[in-house]
Image (cartoon, rainbow, N blue to C red):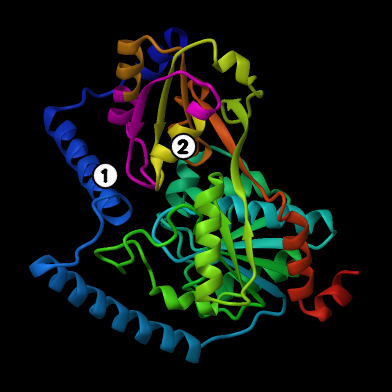
Amino acid sequence: MNKDLSGGCGTGMQTRTQSERMKSGLRNALHDRVRRTWYGSEGGFSRGIPGFLARSAGWCYTCALRRDQDRSLRAQGSLPATVISIGNLTVGGTGKTPLTLWLARYFQKRGWSAAILSRGYGGSSRNASRVPCDGDTMPLVLRYGDEPVLLARRADPAAVWTGRDRMAAGLAAIHETGARMLLLDDGFQHLRVKRDIDLLLLDASNPFGNGSVLPFGPLREPVHSIQRAHAIVLTRADHEERTQNTRSRLARLFPGKPIFCCRHELTKFRIGINGPAMALDTLKEGGITAFAGIADPQAFFRSLRNLGLNLQVELSFPDHHVYGRENIEAILRSSRQHRTRFLVTTEKDFVRLPADFQPAVVFTELDLAFQPDESDFQAFLERSIPSSSFRIHH
C-alpha cells in the first residue's frame, strides 16, 4: 500500500527541521511522563516538597472548581426535552464518544428523535452550530473539534450541535430538528444544563489513576463527586478480575448506585473516508505502522495486537493532535524504513488527517458491547426517563 500512496502524499511536503523534531519529541516525552505519573506505576506525589505542592495545588483547584460549580448551579436551566449527560471523572478517554453513539442509535431505533450536544473541544466555533455530516474533515475539525466531526458522521441522522452555551445549542437543536432526546457529551462537569440522567464513565482497570485531582493527578473532581451520578458505566471491562474488583470497590463506596460494564470493540476497518471495509485477514498479511493521538494510544495498540495484527511501528501523539505535514512525513518515513504494508489509526485520528493523506490510511471503527449488562442497562434507561417523554414519543 505504501509504495503507491506515500509518493503522492509526500509531494510538496516541507522538510522537517531538526528544531521541529526536537519540539515534537519533547512534547511527546512530556505527555508520556504525565501519563505515567497520573496512571502508571510511578504513582502520585505523597511525600516531601512534591507532596506538599501537590496537595496545595489540588486544594486550590478544588476550591476554584466548587466556586464555578456553585455559579453554574445557581444559573442552571432546563431544556424542553429529556437530557442525558455522558461524562467522566478523569482527564482523557474513557469511551464517552462510543457510548454517546450507542445511545443515539438506541433511541433512534425506538423512534425517539435525538440530538447530541458537544462542547467542541479544540474547535474555533463559539456560537451554537450544527456540525455537517460530510465534507473534508480537517477544516471541520478546526472549526468544530474532532469528536463532534466524528459523531456527526457516525450518528447521522442524529444531529450534532456545538457551542460554548449548551443551553443555546440545545434550544437550536430542538427548534431546527425537533429533537426530544438530547445527549450531553462530556457533561458531568457541565452543570449549567439540568439533566434527567447523569451517566458517569470510569475505566474498569484504573478508574482514578493516582487518586489526585488536577494538576498532579487525572481527576477532574474528587472521587466523592461520583455520588452525583445516577449510574456508573465501567468501560474497557476486558479483564474480569480487575473489573470485578473495581465494581466491588465502587459498590462499597456508593451503595445502591447502579453499575454497568461494557467493552470497547474494534468492529470494522475502513480504507479512506468513504472507502470500503477491509477484512481483518487482509490486514494480517502485512506489517503495520500504527499511529494514534488519543488519551491512551497504548490501549489502541494493544487492541490491534490482540486481533493478531503485526505492529512493526507504533507512533504516539498527544491527545487531539492535529497532524501537520511534518507528522505525515515522519509516519511515512517510519513506514518505509520498516517496510510496513499498512498505515492504521483510530477514527478520531483519521478525521484530523489532511484530505490527500486519508486514502493512504486504514482506520478502525470503535463500538461498545454491554453483554451481559445490556438488558439491565436498557431497563435502567427506561426506568429513569421521565414518563412525559414516553407520552411525547409514543
Residue 242 shows in the view: yes
Look at label 1 and name its amino acid: Asp
Which residue lies under the disc numbered 2? 300
Image-quadrant location for residue 247: bottom right
Specify whether 276 is left or right of 23. Answer: right
Which residue lies under the disc numbered 1? 32
Q: Position of residue 244 (x, y in %)?
A: 56, 56
Task: Determine the residue located farthest toward the right in the rendered image.
Answer: 394
Look at label 2 and name its amino acid: Phe
Specify whether 348 is left or right of 336. Answer: right
Q: Earlier in the sequence, mark 1 or mark 2?
A: 1
Frontmost residue, 165 versus 28: 28
- Residue 8 in the magenta stretch? The answer is no
Q: Position of residue 230 (x, y in %)?
A: 62, 75
Residue 132 shows in the view: no
Label 1 neighbourhood size at 10 Å, few (<14), some (14-19), many (20+)?
some
Dot label at residue 209: none
Specify whether 317 is left or right of 14. Answer: right
Please provide the residue range marked out in magenta: 305-330
Q: Position of residue 26 (x, y in %)?
A: 17, 41
Position of residue 173 relative to residue 285, above or below, is: below
Count of numbered badges drawn on the protein: 2
Q: Residue at x 61, y 74 (%)?
A: 257
Position of residue 180 relative to residue 368, above or below, is: below
